[in-house]
Amino acid sequence: MARKTTGKKEKEKTDMADKKRYCYAFEEGDGTNKKLLGGKGAGLCTMTQIGLPVPPGFVITTEANVDYLEYDKFPEGLMDEVHEYMEALEKKTEKGFGDPNKPLLVSVRSGSALSMPGMMDTILNLGLNDETVGGLCALTKNERFVYDAYRRFLQLFGKIGLGVKDEGFDEIFEETKKKYNAQVDTELTAEAMKEVCAHFKDNIKKQTGRPFPQDVWAQLYISIEGVFRSWMGKRAVDYRRQFNITPEMALGTAVNICTMVFGNMGNDSATGVGFTRDPGTGEHMMYGDYLINAQGEDVVAGIRTPRPLRELRTDMPDIYKELEKLNSTLEKHYREVQDYEFTIERGKLYMLQTRNGKMNAWALCKTSVDLVKEGLITEEEALLRIDPDMLEQFLHRRIDPDFKQEPLAVGISASPGAATGKVVFDADRAEYLGNQGEKIILTRVETKPEDIHGFFAAQGILTSRGGKTSHAAVVARGMGKPCVSGAEGLDINYELKEARVGDVVMKEGDIVTLDGTAGAVYLGAVPMLDPDLPKDLKTLMEWADKYAKIEVWANADTPDMAQRAREHGAMGIGLCRTERMFNEADRLPLMRNMILADTPEERKRWADKLTPMQRQDFVEIFRAMNGLPVTIRLLDPPLHEFLPSIEELINDVNRLREFSQIMYAMEQLPGTVAMLDPELYKQMPSIESLTREVGDYRAKGLDQKLLKQKEQVLRRVRVLHEYNPMLGNRGVRCGISFPEIYDMQIKAIFEAVAIALREKIDARAEIMIPNVCTVQELVWVKPRVENLHKEVEKRYNVKIKYKFGTMVEIARACLRAARIATVAEFFSFGTNDLSQGTFSFSREDAENKFLPIYNTEGILRHNPFEILDELGVGRLMQIAVKEGRETRPDLKIGICGEHGGQPQAIEFCHRIGLNYVSCSPMRIPIARMAAAHAAIKENQVGAQVTRAL
Ligand code: PEP
Ligand code: MG
């Protein structure tokens, strides 16, 4: 490969062509190849090549680092190249490396393909020694500056090149400051700095057993090796592990060798950092900080307070203008906001680094729209800049990111958002206090349907047990309230109305703050930020819908949720879990009675009472979703979930029995006392009246009546009890065992459509059957649907259109999709159950017990309940899509498990050809963005393939 800079003979060039090349001058490196040149090196090359003022230099590639680590020595030819490029630098700068009269000084900086803050090593002023300092003094006429540079170099070189700890250097420096009564570094004179340098050299000798190398080439070799080794240093390895940086993403660090420029050469020199736009707001303005007469590390170290970049306009107007121009050149080239470092040396501006600017979500949205308006990027590129999950920040209250405090307890981030309120341990009390206007955090070991009124009253929900699909988590998410579940450190005692975490006791009424996004619980109120929708989000969402192919629907169980879903842009309801409608205080007793009924007739009687309530909810949902499909799933959970627990009932029954015995004993009391002690009996005249009162009370038989009821419920709960309810009599199995329940629901749906149609509402019901494993289950249910459909059409004298379909959430249903599609007009993947079934993991047990171990041991990379397992669960889905559509080509297929709101899964669903994803109303913007990403990325890949052909 030919080199532009070295001017070697043709023959040598040809020889080099066979060798691996390790060095590239900034003029020649390919700025798009960050993997080879590292981010910093690539940026320096690009800036040089687009005509920005970069001090001359070159990059040693990441490959050189990899080869060094492999052979544990410099790879063959590397140092020859380094010499060659240093010579070229000498020519360009007209200085000499190690020349005591005109010394060339360089910086040596690491830089891998991905930015890894905290691991980046930088050595400045390399090339200084006891001789060259003299030359530099003569050149700069500033002894203090030179010895300051020398001591900085000695420390950095000692640390990075020779592994000498900072502490020794810092001590020496502090002692010198004390000796000369200096508060800050700048108060030290040249003489004091000279002293520091001498002590630093002694320190190096003491710590390493060898003198500080005066030979500048030795300095360079040692520094390059130091940077190379830092790639495998603990800091860097930990960082890569923490942020999942794989070798495919970044392998090895490049070493950038760049001529030194000095921002501390007087008041016409400065150093600073800039952003081409404000990273906090996205505003197009000069943003950044600078310090006059300082080196880069002074800005970072915070010794002096930097000034806002806009003030440079008055300090150095020409440079300011140059920077303005440079901002625009950088953005035009990178088509992205840039974050750069610069130095001004005696009135001349130099660029030392540029990279894509990291911005907060608000700035990212604004700049996405602005960059499109300015014609710098396309709409597709603007959308791809935005990580869909980031949109979550706009939708919920959140803890102020500046707040840093250890949480009292941590649990599972079950429902995002943050809330502060008083701890209350039962739902009734939560409701009572909530109605008084108090802010409440409902705190339970776990929640049940009968706690629902407490949910309504609370700002947030906290449980000590349960995972992301616990009742608390699912209901809170549906309501958009923050929830921390499974905070196992909390020891809740209902009797004492307190919860303990170690020694800390949280009493009812104490204030706590929940961070449902992070799964943390704090004592007291914590500063929070309100949800804040950026004004550009609407534009971005419109663009997203334009590119997306897969539709986004919502999981919504109530009219309120449906309304919210529509506001967020849902194109339909993909899952209305009807069981949630029974949770309200006036409905639960009816539901219980229906379940407790001994005969079908009695069950129907109770079911008939529930019909109007369900019907009313459906009507309201149809109103909210006018013109859009509403998928209503018939009852799914096992029935005993609606009943009190066996333990609670046994407790009640025992108490009532004891009460009866006590009452009986009291009735017998006069006779018993008389028998034991006739004298005492005579002294207790009131005993007869007490006995009479007890007798009267017993005659009413209230306790007996209640006892009988409780015993009956207990019997029924025992009958309904299942060893493994998630695999038991639930969903369609329950519907077949107790047909009155499904009949009631189907009737309510059709009647609601009829009522809505009369109001001229375009109600589009889709009836969905849960937990189907064989087509025969659908064959059993369908005629009941058809009969009720006919009956309601006739009674209301309307034509009702509807669809009949099924959840696909059992592995067998995937494998029998071809047959199931003969009856089902649509499929909806229930990936919550499908994931549990495919792995044979119960989610709660898995997440609380072995999944974290599986993740850390690398047995499973992800939690399959959060990240869709494409290889297993996804494969089953693919089979179902393919075979289902072979039977019914227009089969509509969606997903309504939690993965439906997860960007990676949405991309997968797009790829396998689903028509829609359905997720909780609050995730709809995220899903819309993810749907657009999926389509745009597919187009890009498609375009690449076409180009390759
Ligand atoms: C599912 O299993 O994915 C699903 C949506 O149903 P549920 O979570 O209600 O069991
Ligand atoms: Mg399910």
Image (cartoon, grey):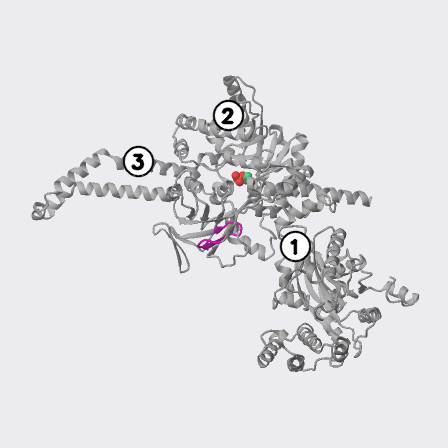
Q: Which mark is residue 947?
A: none
| Quarter occupied by the C terminus | top right
Confirm whether residue 165 shows in the render.
no
Residue 408 percent coordinates (x, y): 46, 57
| Secondary element at tag 3 | helix
C-alpha gap between disc 3 and disc 1 = 68 Å
Q: Name the residue beneath numbered marker 2.
A: 752
Residue 696 percent coordinates (x, y): 19, 35
Q: Earlier in the sequence, mark 3 or mark 1?
A: 1
Please state which amino acid type lies under the numbered disc 1: Lys
Please indicate whether residue 135 sits to the left or right of residue 814 in the image.
Answer: right
Q: Mark 3 and 2 residues: CB-CB less than 8 Å, in contact?
A: no
Q: Earlier in the sequence, mark 3 or mark 2?
A: 3
Q: Earlier in the sequence, mark 2 or mark 1?
A: 1
| Quarter occupied by the N terminus | bottom right
Q: Residues within 10 Å of mark 3 (few under 14, many from 20)?
A: some
* Residue ID at (60%, 52%): 860
Q: What number of labels is visible?
A: 3
C-alpha gap between disc 3 and disc 2 = 38 Å
Q: Name the residue beneath numbered marker 3.
A: 708
C-alpha gap between disc 2 and disc 1 = 51 Å
The span shown in magenta is 514-526
Q: Name the residue beneath numbered marker 1.
A: 358
Q: Nearer the viewer, mark 2 or mark 1?
A: 1
